[in-house]
C-alpha cells in the first residue's frame, strides 16, 4: 500500500526551500481561501472555488471546469480570438478599401499583435496560477504583467503613428521609443527577480512609466496642432481621455477589490467569481473599444484623418 501511495504522489514546490509530496486526485478539487497556498491569497473576499496543487496536465484540464478563474480564462481566450478576427478583417477588408500603405499594414499588425499577446499572457497566468510549483506560478504572473504592459504600449503605436503622420521626425522618435519600451518592459518583467521585494520600486517605476508615457506625445500633439481649440484636437482628444478613464476605472476596481468587498457572492456563485475580472475585463473592454470605436480605431483614422484632414491640410 505504501508503494502505491508513493507512485501516485506528486511534488509541489513550497517557496524556494524544499519539495513536499502531496497526493493529487484524478479529479480537480476546488479549495477554500484558507486551504490554498499563500501565493494565491491576494483577495480574501473571494472565499471559495480555488484550484490549487495541480500539475500542468490538470491545469489545462481545469479550463473546462467551473472555478473562480473561469470568467478570467474564457473572457481573455475569447478576447484573443476576437482581436485575431478583427485583424483578419482589417487586413483583408478595411485596409485595402482605404488604399492603405505598407506602413499602415505594419502599424495595424503591431497594434493587434500586442493586444493578442496581452490576452494570451492573461490566459496562461489564470490557467496555470494553480500549478503545484510556486516558481511556475510566479513565472506566469510575470508574463501576465508583461502582457498588460505590452497591451498598453500597443495602444500607443497607432496613436503615435497617425497623430504625427505629417511630422516624420517626431513620429519616428515616438515610435522608436514605444518599441524600445515594449522590449525593455517585456524582458524586465520576465526576469526571475521581477516579483521579488528588491525589485518593488522598479515594478512601480515600470508601470508608472508605461501608463503615463502616452501623456507626453498627446500634449505634444495638441501643441503642434494649435491647442485645444483646433478641430482635429477636439475630434480626437476626447477619445484619448476616455481611454485613460477606462484604464483608471479598471485599476481602481482592482486595488479596491470592488464589488466582492461589499457584495460577497453566495457559495454557489463564488465558483464563477474572478479574482481579477474587475480589472481585466475593463482592460479588455478598453482594447475592444480602441479597435472598434476609439480612441484610435483604424477605420475612423482612415476616414477622419486620411480623408478629412490631410486633403484640407496637406503635409508639407
Image (spheres, rainbow, N blue to C red):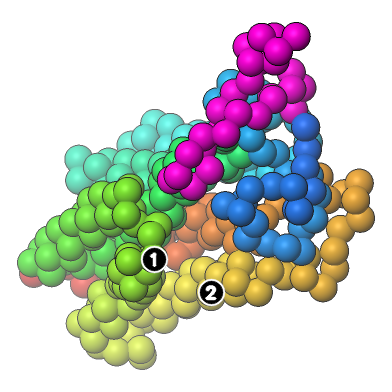
Provide residue 37's location: percent of width, then percent of height: 63, 48
Residue at the spot 73% in from the left edge and 63% down from the top edge = 44
Q: Is residue 222 above or below residue 97?
A: below
Residue 153 magenta: no
Pick the residue in front: 168 or 267: 267
Pick the residue in front: 41 or 150: 41
Residue at the spot 39% in from the left edge and 65% down from the top edge = 197
Question: Which mark lies nearer to you, 2 or 1?
Answer: 1
Determine the image quadrant of residue 161: bottom left
- Label 2 vs label 1: CA separation? 25 Å
Does residue 84 appear in the picture of this structure? yes
Q: Quadrant of the N terminus?
A: top right
Pick the residue in front: 70 or 9: 9
Provide residue 280's location: percent of width, then percent of height: 58, 56
The residue carrying pointer 1 sits among few (fewer than 14), some (14 to 19) or many (20 or more) residues within 10 Å by Cα, namely few
**Which residue bears the numbered disc 2?**
248
Q: Is residue 218 left or right of residue 4?
A: left
Q: Earlier in the sequence, mark 2 or mark 1?
A: 1
Q: Quadrant of the C terminus?
A: bottom left
Considering every residue shown, the one lying at the far front of the view is 2
Residue at the spot 69% in from the left edge and 25% down from the top edge = 23
Q: Is residue 82 above or below residue 311?
A: above
Residue at the spot 63% in from the left edge and 11% down from the top edge = 7
Determine the image quadrant of residue 180: bottom left
Provide residue 275's location: percent of width, then percent of height: 67, 55
State the SS at label 1.
Answer: helix
**Which residue bears the numbered disc 1?**
197
Does residue 151 appear in the picture of this structure? no
The residues colored magenta run 1-28
Provide residue 165's location: percent of width, then percent of height: 20, 63
Amino acid at each position: 500500500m505504501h508503494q502505491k501511495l508513493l507512485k501516485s504522489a506528486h511534488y509541489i514546490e513550497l517557496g524556494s526551500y524544499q519539495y513536499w509530496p502531496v497526493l493529487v486526485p484524478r479529479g480537480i478539487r476546488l479549495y477554500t481561501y484558507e486551504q490554498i497556498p499563500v501565493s494565491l491569497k491576494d483577495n480574501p473576499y473571494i472565499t471559495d472555488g480555488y484550484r490549487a496543487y495541480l500539475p500542468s496536465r490538470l491545469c489545462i484540464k481545469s479550463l473546462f471546469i467551473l472555478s473562480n478563474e473561469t470568467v478570467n480564462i474564457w473572457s481573455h481566450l475569447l478576447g484573443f480570438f476576437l482581436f485575431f478576427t478583427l485583424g483578419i478583417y482589417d487586413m483583408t477588408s478595411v485596409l485595402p478599401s482605404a488604399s492603405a500603405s505598407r506602413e499602415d499594414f505594419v502599424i495595424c499588425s503591431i497594434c493587434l499583435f500586442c493586444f493578442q499577446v496581452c490576452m494570451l499572457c492573461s490566459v496562461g497566468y489564470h490557467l496555470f496560477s494553480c500549478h503545484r510549483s510556486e516558481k511556475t506560478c510566479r513565472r506566469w504572473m510575470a508574463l501576465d504583467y508583461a502582457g498588460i504592459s505590452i497591451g498598453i504600449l500597443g495602444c500607443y503605436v497607432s496613436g503615435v503613428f497617425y497623430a504625427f503622420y505629417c511630422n516624420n521626425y517626431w513620429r519616428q522618435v515616438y515610435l522608436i521609443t514605444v518599441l524600445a519600451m515594449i522590449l525593455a518592459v517585456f524582458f524586465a518583467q520576465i526576469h526571475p527577480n521581477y516579483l521579488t521585494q528588491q525589485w518593488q520600486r522598479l515594478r512601480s517605476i515600470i508601470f508608472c512609466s508605461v501608463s503615463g508615457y502616452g501623456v507626453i506625445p498627446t500634449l505634444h500633439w495638441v501643441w503642434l496642432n494649435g491647442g485645444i481649440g483646433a478641430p482635429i484636437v477636439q475630434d480626437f482628444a476626447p477619445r484619448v481621455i476616455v481611454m485613460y478613464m477606462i484604464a483608471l476605472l479598471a485599476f481602481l476596481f482592482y486595488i479596491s477589490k470592488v464589488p466582492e468587498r461589499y457584495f460577497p457572492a453566495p457559495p454557489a456563485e463564488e465558483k464563477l467569481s474572478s479574482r481579477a475580472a474587475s480589472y481585466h475585463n475593463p482592460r479588455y473592454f478598453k482594447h475592444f473599444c480602441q479597435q472598434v470605436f476609439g480612441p484610435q480605431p483604424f477605420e475612423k483614422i482612415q476616414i477622419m484623418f486620411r480623408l478629412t484632414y490631410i486633403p484640407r491640410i496637406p503635409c508639407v
